[in-house]
Amino acid sequence: MSSFSFAAGVMRSSIAAILFLLPSLLQSGVFEFAGEIHGVDVITHPTGYDGTGNKLIVTVGIAPSSIHADRMAVAVQNAIQTWNQLIPTLGNIVTSGNRIPVDQFDFESVTLHELGHCIGLSHPNLAVESGLTGNDKNYTASTKGANQVYDLNPGIDGIIGSSDDIRGDDVNLHWFPKGVNNPFLIPQTVDQLTYSRDLGDLPVVDHFAVNADRDVSEIYPIEKTEAVMQQGILAGEWRRTLAADDVATLRLGMSGMDRIAGTADDYTVELHYAGFTDNADITLAFDDKVTFSACEIQADFLGGNHNHLAIQTGNISFNSNFPWYFETELRTPESTPAVAIRINDQTYAQQLQRGDTVKLSVTLDPHDKNGNLSDYWVKAMTPFGTFWLNENMQFVASEVPIRAYGGSLVHISGLSLFEDAAGQLPPGLYSVYFAVDDNMDGIYDGTFKSSAIFTIQSF
């Protein structure tokens, strides 16, 4: 048996992992246990997967004896709902208008991250387990390669974790969309036919797999975005919604042992809140066993296949000596407004040819907040600048937020905002957002937000 855990520091979270079958330390990657010891192709599945297609129910409980047990409950249930919805978002780093004091750490955001570890996902960056320090930890997850050192060069753009990083003989562990290499996009189908670790499947101009780091997101025309599984959380911020990379990685695992979506060994996973108990599949506690936070898991190989592991149990530990912010508002599907923005009636990323049509539309179901006063916002980040939909239903170029509407939350079944031929727009990547605030104060908070991406080809 072997185990490891790493100091998180006041601005980092971490994972400790245990595998009872083989000795020595483990390398982290996009999937837990993937690395030099157990193999770079390892995919780790949630508790209950046995290689056959089914619905996995993974229970999550709070240790009754834990410090802050009562205060943890709301945030844990909210994080469970976020994983169950499995919705990819953009702009998930929120640092203003989020109610979190600047000197406190958001327990819900950290719990969301640690739950991801406990269902099989690891850091897409090298993180503290690599032994690296400073920004070097943000390079894309890999092994050291034959020379037994990490080869680290940020390339011409100087941005760590981007496509032009020069990584020598480091072996990539990060699964990326073939021919695209953009962790902020997600196609309709996610399996080994659309995703790869092989650098030969990168676009011809790319050197290494991109990871969904917040600094990397600035290369693309999107709001500040970072994978929930990216290691590191700052005081005063929350990351309470999943990025495309988080969703795609779990969905890749859900394609089963054959890694082909739509076959008999596919599964779905649903987290269930078990309340205050020590007997759940995943148990959370403020037990001060770790520097900041960590998920400790045990896993077994599936049959004789050493490329697939199934988690048996998981324990998430937190350190109580930090200033934690505990959410008090329980979000349920019935109480949370459902907002969506669609590209050609679809929410997944699309690549459009010059002759295709671009249609933007939005839907809104206010649920229990029907009639509440709110601000409505529609933002488009394009290759030729940032645009906002104004009250006259026109997109206006502006770096300052422009409100589309201020008034009551109402049902919107499918309002068309824009429709034109793709050839009328410059080629490149477009990201669009539809957001409604939980108040009407003219300040862009984006309390409930949906986003979508599309690319217009240049040929």
Image (spheres, helix red, strand yellow):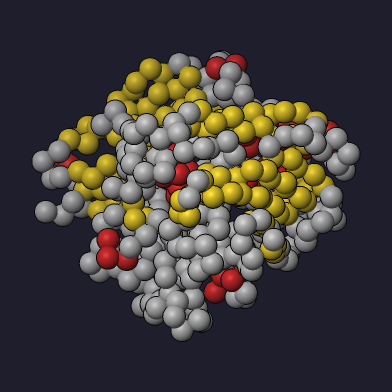
**Up-down relation of residue 95 to residue 165 (above or below):** above
Front one among 115 and 240: 115
- The residue that appears at 47% across and 68% down in the rendered structure is 142
**What residue is at 80 percent from the left and 31 percent from the top?**
276
Q: Nearer the viewer, residue 10 or 171?
A: 171
Number of callouts: 0
Report if residue 287 is visible in the image: yes
Residue visible at 52% across and 62% down? 38
The N terminus: image quadrant: bottom right
User: Which residue, as the protein is rendered here, is positioned at the far bottom?
Assistant: 147
On the image, the x and y values in percent for residue 217 come to 44, 57
For the residue pair 103 and 209, the one nearer the viewer reads as 209
- The image shows residue 86 at horizontal and vertical percentages of 49, 36
Task: Give the residue displayed 69% in from the left and 52% down from the top.
Answer: 296
Question: In the picture provided, is 410 more to the left or to the right than 112?
Answer: left
The C terminus - image quarter: bottom left
**Observer-nearest residue: 433 or 317?**
317
Q: From the viewer's perspective, is 311 left or right of 338?
A: right
Farthest-out residue, front: 304
Above or below, 135 against 442 in this view is: below
Q: Do we see residue 116 in this rendering?
A: no
Q: Name the image quarter holding residue 207.
A: bottom left
Horizontal placement of 60 versus 147: left or right?
A: right
Rendering coords of residue 225 (x, y %): 49, 52
Q: Quadrant of residue 422?
A: top left
On the image, the x and y values in percent for residue 392 come to 34, 29
